[in-house]
Amino acid sequence: MRRKLPLRVSAALYGGAAALVVAVVVAAAAMVWQMRESALADTEGQASRFASGAEAAINRSLVGADVLLASLGAVLADSTAEQVRGEATRSRVNSVMREMARESLLVRQFALVQADGRILAPATAQGMATPLELPEGFVREVLAQPVSSLQVSDPRVSPVSSQRVLYLARALDLQDGTRLVAVAEVPVSTFTTILTQGADIAGLEVTLERSGGAVLASMPPRDDPSVRAARQPLNEREADGHPKFMTSRLTGVPAVVVYRPTLHRNLLVVAGIPLDVALADWEVQRDFIIGVAVVLVLMVLAVAAFALHQLRRQWAHRASLQRSKATLDQALDAMSDGFVLLDAEGRAQVWNQRLLDLFPGIEPFVGSAATFQLPGADAARANAGAVGLGDGEYELRLEDGRRILAMRSPTPDGGQVGVFRDVTERLRQIAEVVEGRAQLQATLDAVPDAMLEVGLDGRCHRYHPPRTASVTAPFPGDPVGRTLADLFAPDAASQIMNALREAYQQGLSAGQQIERRAEHGTAWFELSVSRMDVGEGQDARFIVMLRDITEHKAAAQEIEHLAFYDTLTGLPNRRLLLHRLQAVVENNAHRGRQGALLFLDLDHFKTLNDAQGQAMGDVLLRQVADRLRALLGVGDTVARLGGDEFVILVDNLGIDPVRAAVQTQAFGEGVLADLGRPYQLGSYTYHGTTSIGATVFGDRSQSLDELLKQADIAMFHAKQAGGNGLRFFEAPMQTTITARATLENELHAALKGHQFTLHYQRQVAAAGEITGAEVLIRWRHPHRGLIPPAAFIDVAEGTGLIVPIGIWVLEQACRQLEQWSHHPRRRHLQLAVNVSARQFQREDFADQVREVFIRTGADPSRLKIELTESLLQDKVEETIRKMKSLAAIGVRFAMDDFGTGYSSLSYMAQLPLHQVKIDKFFVGGIGSSPKLELLIQTIIGMARSLDLEVVAEGVETPEQLAFLERHGCRLFQGYLFGRPLDIEELERELDVELVSPG
């Protein structure tokens, strides 16, 4: 059971408390909101009623004043302006106005005003006229009305009473058409009294204002006598008497505002009660309700907290009880022995899982009223006694082979405690220990090593001899009781004692080797020493194992020899050469002396291997090695790097680099002469030559690899020069090799990047008819532009890239032939493709060509393969077989550059040729070299005899063409007929030239 109260119980309690809190909060909020709405509704009604009453009072006052002013018009209706200015009329008018002033509670005085603003007849109730100060333009505004009506001025300050007053005016029409203005002066305070109507409403604001916002009178009154607009203009059309929530007209605080129009246009009565006043009582009620709600919420939370505390205490108590029981159960289940507690009647009260595991059939006798019994073998003995167990300890042998040790002890209440231990594994381990000791002894007897138990003083206490007598004993006789100094030579005894001390400190010592010399030979032993575990206070003891490694040592020496020497010739290999070269370079740099490195490569060694077999080649290599050994001086080294490559390291050449080079030259020439002597390879006499590259060194400016590379480069140039020679390394050689390596890498990239393209040079007949074209490869280099084949074909030949390049050219040519086969004016054209000797000599060349025809669908009879005479140097029979194989499917063959190579007329008769091509070297001599002209005639005559076509290459002038035609040549190729073109340009020209006039 978990120690903490479950989350679901806490969540339920928290949820209930939260629900009550939410209910209280919602109820309080609803009451507060309802009471607020009620307070606002009361305020709105109060404001509406007041505004309605104020409007009625203002209307009555304005109507009364208007009637009085209109009555003056009736008095003067029959008078003219001149009469009015007369004393009699003015006196009568003043009398009327005084009477009106006495009767009116609103108007303080009346006056007649001319259009220019001059007062004709002022009058008050007391009969004393006071000056009037009308607002500027007020008289013009009154007279400007087409229909006379009451006008109200802006507030002014009376010059007599210093009170704020309003002027009510109306235009009067006289008999002669003159218009006068009747004016009534009304104190603003009178209007204020009319507006308030004696109402006692806290915070009430009342204004009489124009629709534009100008305040004429207000309550509470304003101290500022000037006319100022209210907060914002009011729309007279919205003056419907309904309450609105807006800012008050005077103080600008939020308020409930009601405004109503008067009978006078543009005059509004506005009443407003501030919201803080309207909601003052509500706020008191709100605070009370919130307080009550807070108290209720706190009560709910307190009750919930108390309930949670009580639940946690109860839960913790239950958890403590369950933990105690769980601890007991865990203790019982953790026991490796079975346990059972029986009461006085023999019933099982407490038991553990181990008991059930030991006795699978015991479940019916535990946890029930049945008397406890043990099932299985020896049950009668186990169940003896009233409580189901006998006295003491005894062993149970169960039917499944297990052996159980049973132990019992009584309890104070008359019960029993039974403990059952599975001792099967322990007994098995004891048996294994016994067996292990026997096996250990057998193992020791089988170990081929001699073993000694030795003390730290070097005295032998025990000895186990080697497994068989055939193993060499490390010492004579029985070593027990003797010291290591008695058993071994001093050096060996000292090594073993050092190993004992190392094992004493580190616990183990291994890997040391000791030598024992005897009359029958030397034996080697590998030493292993381990410290034994002994009791505290006892002298240290060690196990010393001596393994006979004599044969292993000999094998290791043989392996070391193989690692540093060539197995065929017995010469040092590359690894040992580099080691010695490093030593010579460092020694010479320290002493300021010179050394030399010569790189040898046997000329035409591959030819010997191919012709006579590898075994004969090995015989030659051994004889070369013997001759080179005989040439070495003191400190010199000759090594074989592999194949037919040898390197000679010459030391002690003095301090002068020039003299060292002369000595190297002389030594190299001696090597050339000695290796140039005939070799007797069994019954076969072989004459061979060698190419040598040399480099002289005297400091550490070059690495070992650089020195070897320099000698190798020099050898390459010697071989390029024809072989059988010596060349020294020069810096330009490195540049040449680097350029060649760069070109090789770029050729690989060109093949992968599809940078090659084909150009076509037409071949024509004597009549000018186009018969076909020769396919010429070009390299469209990304940086160097279009590169002709002469710049890269030799490198492609040397690297073998000529093979994939040649296949690509063949495939492109065949695809072009297949396209032309669908064109009526091009289907007769042939394409000639040059194939290198290296590509043609591949075993699968004929198969590759046939696969190209299958892939492209081209007609084989339209393809002409041009071969060079160098193909006839070797494997002539194989060459003839391949040519006949391809000729059988229609492929035609031409001998390219005829007359410049190694062709033999006997082979020419056997080859399935269709054409020979006169090299442009001969054609270029026409007209300047009679000998070349004679050779051309000979070639043409021979070809005619062999029934072969003749194609002349390099025809550039009409004179050359005429000579060739005159002597029977009928096919031509050269700049006279067109330069090599890409396929688009060629086809454009063909489209023009192949269209016949008819």
Image: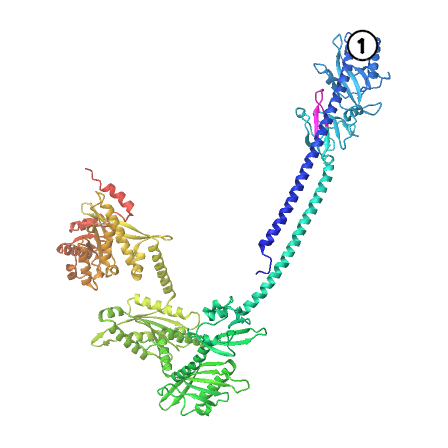
Is the N terminus in the top left, top right, bottom left or bottom right quadrant?
A: bottom right
Q: Amino acid at mark 1?
A: Val
What is the x, y in percent for residue 934? 17, 56
Q: Nearer the viewer, residue 32 or 44?
A: 32
Q: Name the image quarter holding residue 45.
A: top right
Say whether residue 714 is left or right of residue 259: left
Q: Is residue 740 visible?
A: yes
Relative height, residue 967 to residue 733 (above, below): above
Looking at the magenta stretch, what is its main secondary structure?
Answer: strand
Q: At 55% from the left edge and 67% from the top edge, which residue is drawn?
A: 329
Q: Count the numbered circles shown.
A: 1
Relative height, residue 739 to residue 786 (above, below): below
Is the C terminus in the top left, top right, bottom left or bottom right quadrant?
A: top left
Q: At 48% from the left edge and 90% from the top edge, which residue is drawn?
A: 459
Looking at the rendering, the stretch of residues picked out in magenta corresponds to 257-270
**Circle 1 is placed at which residue position?**
84
What is the x, y in percent for residue 397? 44, 76
